[in-house]
Image (cartoon, grey):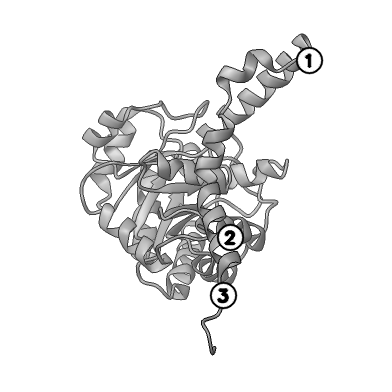
Amino acid sequence: MLHTRTTPAQRRRALRQRLTTGRLLTMPGAVNPYSAKLIEEHGYEAAYLSGAVLAAELCLPDIGLTTSTEVAARAQQVTRVTDLPVLIDADTGFGAPVNAARTVQLFEDAGLAGLHLEDQTAVKRCGHLDGKTLVTREEMAQRVRAAADARRDPDFLLMARTDARSVEGLQAAIDRAKAYIDAGADAVFPEALADEGEFAAFRAAVDVPLLANMTEFGKSPLLGARTLQDLGYDIALYPVTLFRLMNGAVEDGLRTLAAEGSQESLLPRMQTRSRLYEVLGYADYTAFDSAVHDFTLPPGA
């Protein structure tokens, strides 16, 4: 009730340890604190916060318009309610290398378990759109190095994302990933790989934990968990899945309400009031409030 039962340090260690097991970690993207709680209740072992979702929640495109403090504030709201380790999208670090350093510390303070930085220019684009531009390999290495040096908790996971596959080709993306590891990255996120063979080639070339982005309607095929496990990937990411499902349901509900003049036919598809209250822990809050209300000081106090 009110807060998690674990500390950020415990959650960071849990994520680090989980990535040593050799088992694929399935990581859905939370839309908000409530959905993060649902991810935990449904048995997942980690959650994710997508920069694209955080921007879209503000009705903004994913082109670097959000700020590090906006994102950190939203992240803290999520980490307050879940005992899962949460990985977050830090875009390009929100500026120069020193901004990336500040971002690491903001996100540590927000209770996150790790972040990923990407090698796009500051005016970034969604990783599955055309027209991306990259900073040089050296500039991104400086970004990663600054982030690594600013980290206070050694268990805070620093992941480097490279968008080079769509711009410079697969081999360049692999070369960049190796440079970022040398600069201090603990894990790598190769964005927009084109097919299963490219996923395999990246795994063969890079020996740190790898993330596979299974976002819908993008450039990468939607590989199943068994396939990703066999390919040797460590994290299967579903960054926008819940957001898209939610928005699809909202639009369908609006159409139905307009057409039928009632929400009656939608009731079987709704979460019930009792389930909502169960997730929110209404009974726990009521018990807590009653205990405080009934509290009396002992005689002589």
- Residue picked out by circle 2: 289
How far apart are the alpha carbons under marks 1 and 3? 54 Å
Q: Residue at x 35, y 55 (%)?
A: 187
Q: Position of residue 170 (x, y in %)?
A: 38, 39
Kind of residue at disc 3? Thr
Query: Of discs 2 and 1, which sits in the foreground?
Result: 2
Q: For the residue marked with disc 2, what is the amino acid?
A: Asp
- Amino acid type of the residue tagged 1 in the rendering: Ala
Q: Which residue is mark 1?
A: 258
Helix, strand or loop status at disc 3: loop
Left or right for 267, reference 257 = left
Residue 250: which quarter of the image? top right
**Which image quadrant: the C terminus?**
bottom right
How much space separates mark 3 and mark 2, taking CA atoms? 14 Å
- Under circle 2, the secondary element is helix
Q: Is residue 30 visible?
A: no
Give the image location of residue 30, x and y in percent.
52, 43
Q: Determine which residue is flagged by label 3.
A: 296
- Judged from the image, the secondary structure of the residue bearing numbered disc 1 is helix
Question: Is residue 22 in view?
Answer: yes
- Give the residue at the far bottom of this rendering: 300
Q: Nearer the viewer, residue 21 or 275?
A: 275
Q: Is residue 27 above or below residue 8?
A: above
Q: Residues within 10 Å of mark 3 (few under 14, many from 20)?
A: few
Q: Quadrant of residue 55?
A: top right
